[in-house]
Image (spheres, rainbow, N blue to C red):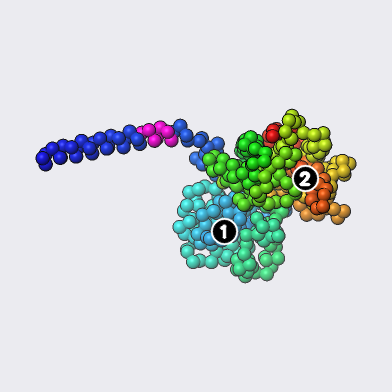
Amino acid sequence: MSSLLNNISEKFILTSICLSMLLFSLSCEQGRKERVELPFPPSDNPWVEIRAERLERLLPLAMQRAGIDVWLVICRENDNDPLAAHIGCENAGGTAAFMFFLDGDKVTSLVYSPEGEAKSLSDVGVHDKVISFKRGGNVFELVADKLIETNPKKIAINSSKMNIADGLSYTLRMQLEEAIGTGMSKRLVSSQDLVTEWLSVKTPAEIEIMRRAAALTAQLEIEAYEMVVPGKTRDSDIAKYLKKRMRELGVEDAWAPEQNPNVNSGVDRGHSHATDKIIQAGDFIQTDFGIKVYGTWVTDIQRFAYVLEPGMTEPPAEAIEKWEIARRGSRIALQAMKPGVTGYSVDLAQRNWMRENSSLPLIWSTGHPVGYWAHDAGPRLGGAASDEPPSGDALRLLYPGQTFAFDGFFSWKLGGETDDSKTISVEEMAVITETGAEYLIPPQEDLILIKH
């Protein structure tokens, strides 16, 4: 009996193993069939190479335009500078100093790093020279000695009203000024102009990535509209669908996740989350959506749909007219975008068109830089919404390689007891070229129609 039980047990174990292997094989095969190919696989991330190119090719020009001799960035663990990844100090441990010296048409970089991290920084090969100092040593004394040696006229530090150029804390600045002395401290200036000039221009490789990402963004928006059932689908359903597709494709939110995408088939709500409003016939649906790819580059594109009444095959004439005014505004803005003009002049061209066509005035700028953030550094395509003289980033000049998200507007009152309005904002992305500007992807020409 014992032998028989042993034989049965062995056969049962072998059968179980074979069955498990078969199920595992079938599971793997099913997984292969269902696996979604990621359009931007992390293994293909070109950021390290692109960053090196930006430091070598674009930083010298940015420093020249901003009139800066030395750029000093202090990096540290747990409270790092917003630009850490852009200059290669994203893995900082102890406090380290990254210095960039303009020398004619070139920039040389020098890093003072605590021992330990210094080795890994050298291995990365981003910087010209990495000098290690004993952990616990005073990095600011080393910086002071180098500044005395080079005697620069203007030293840019990350202290600014613009958040991405405001990484130097008050305490760190006090340590720096104490080390370099009163005379050298008078040469400290904000890096805001330098950072704006540098980050606003993208390399050809970056622009190509953003083209691909923009195409995917628009494709997903159109795909989401295909699932709308008037009278049943809510704005939030479209948002949930897009979130699901983002997870499947391995891309991230271009801005605050709670507000991306902003789907709105009702009255104007500004930058906000999608609500549970049920989509009805006669609605204009606005989807403002952006994705981040490779953890670095973002998009910002809107697509508009119109919900037809039962039995209709096209929108009423007044709906088409509103759409055409907004669409034409986008084209007028694009025509105004060219190297050497200000962001204000682009906004003014759009505002003139809006006034000619009886649009309500809007507080929103025609456009903004986009790239590393949805609202990136660079010229603001704005300033003409009020009677005040243009100022700040609206007066910055456009340069080849800058990328923008911008709108064609038309806004009107909805009537009734409330003072609510509705705005069509045909938002596209464009890049400045040597002679003008071009859309990153084909723009939306017609309303997407949703049948009842």
> Residue 285 appears at what percent x and percent y?
71, 41
> Residue 135 appears at what percent x and percent y?
47, 64
> Residue 329 appears at what percent x and percent y?
80, 39
Q: Tell whether position 28 is magenta.
A: yes
Question: Comparing marks 2 and 1, which lies closer to the viewer?
Answer: 2
Marker count (numbered):
2
- Nearest the viewer among 38 and 274 is 274
Identify the image quadrant of the C terminus. Answer: top right
* Residue under the point 75% across and 31% down: 312
Q: Which image quadrant for residue 425?
A: top right
At numbered mark 2, what does the secondary structure look like: helix, strand or loop?
strand
Name the magenta segment's main secondary structure: helix
Identify whether 185 is placed above or below 346.
Answer: below
> Residue 261 appears at what percent x and percent y?
64, 46
Q: Is residue 4 visible?
A: yes
* Residue under the point 84% across and 44% down: 359
Q: Which residue is mark 2?
A: 423
Identify whether 238 is placed above or below 157.
Answer: above
* Residue under the point 63% across and 35% down: 226
Compared across the picture, whether 339 is left or right of 42 comes to: right
At numbered mark 1, what does the secondary structure look like: helix, strand or loop?
loop
Q: Which residue is mark 1?
A: 80
